Image: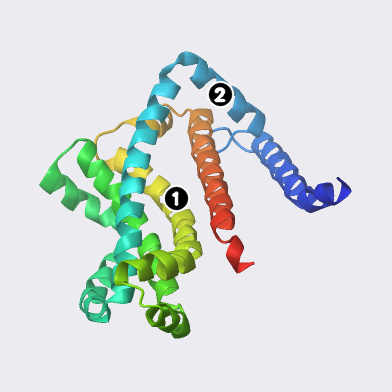
Amino acid sequence: MNSTIRRHAPFWLSLAAGIASWEIVGRNTSQAFMVPFSETVLRLWQLVRSGDFLTQLLDSAQLFMTGFVIAVAIGAPLGLLLARVRTLRVGVEPYIMILYATPMVALIPFILSIMGFGFAPKVLVVFLFAVFPVLYNTIEGARSIRPELIEVARSFRSREWALWREVMLPYTLPFIMTGVRQAIGRALVGMVAAEFFLSSTGLGQLIMGASQNFDTGGVFASIFVIGLIGVGLMRVGLMIEHHFARWRQ
């Protein structure tokens, strides 16, 4: 019990210090720029009671999950394929690097001009924000597999699919989960950016409306919720990574 308390004490002390700093700075700053933590929580409760907040949250959650799941479903298998087939990786890698280095926000007007408004272009924006961390971490993880493991699997006459299932995927899974945790934050940024610049819906619409009405508490409440969602999802991803990577400990 004491060891558990000591292990988690730095986290809770840091969290308490952050909340206290937020409260103090907010009370000594103009509310046009920042509000205290207590007022942020109060404003969040008011938004929840109004009923609109949960609707906006569900809209954003649907957008986030759709784009994020597609990014993981495409990024992880494609990363394994590119790591396994060197010729394909060499041919495709320049285009991946160009897209990865391109600010995704700059592509939103281009996506708008092609696909218009609607749910699909917003999903594409979230996908583009999230797919590259998964893809790159998967490639690097698969390329770091020791050649001896492949040779042993080949000596037991493992077919290509068995090699993927029993060697490449278990070894690469921790790298994939690292990419997934990085993609969560980027997908949330993409979600808000899509809701800002394409059809205004979800938490992005709530933030824009609060900003236009000088409702600083509403802005901070929405950002606070997005941050909590991101931290919670990344913690879940870390737990999944630890569960499937126990063989490496």
Residue 98, percent from left and from top: 26, 70
Q: Is residue 223 left or right of residue 198?
A: right
Three-letter amino acid code at the position of disc 2: Arg
Q: Residue at x 41, y 73 (%)?
A: 142
Secondary structure found at label 2 = helix
- In the depicted structure, whether residue 21 falls above or below residue 3: above
Name the front one of labels 1 and 2: 1
Q: Residue furthest toward the top?
A: 50
- In the depicted structure, whether residue 239 falls above or below residue 141: above
Q: Is residue 21 left or right of residue 163?
A: right
Report which residue position mark 1 lands on: 184
Instruction: Name the residue nearer the viewer: 166 or 219.
Output: 166
Instruction: Name the residue nearer the viewer: 167 or 145.
Output: 167
Report which residue position mark 2 lands on: 43
Q: Residue at x 81, y 48 (%)?
A: 4
- In the depicted structure, whether residue 218 falls above or below residue 24: above
Residue 210, percent from left and from top: 43, 29
Colour scheme shown: rainbow
Residue 127, percent from left and from top: 30, 51
Q: Quadrant of the N terminus?
A: top right
Three-letter amino acid code at the position of disc 1: Ile
Residue 205 visible in rendering = no
Q: CA distance from mark 1 to mark 2?
A: 26 Å
Of the numbered discs 1 and 2, the one sitting upstream in the chain is: 2
Q: Which mark is residue 101?
A: none
Secondary structure found at label 1 = helix
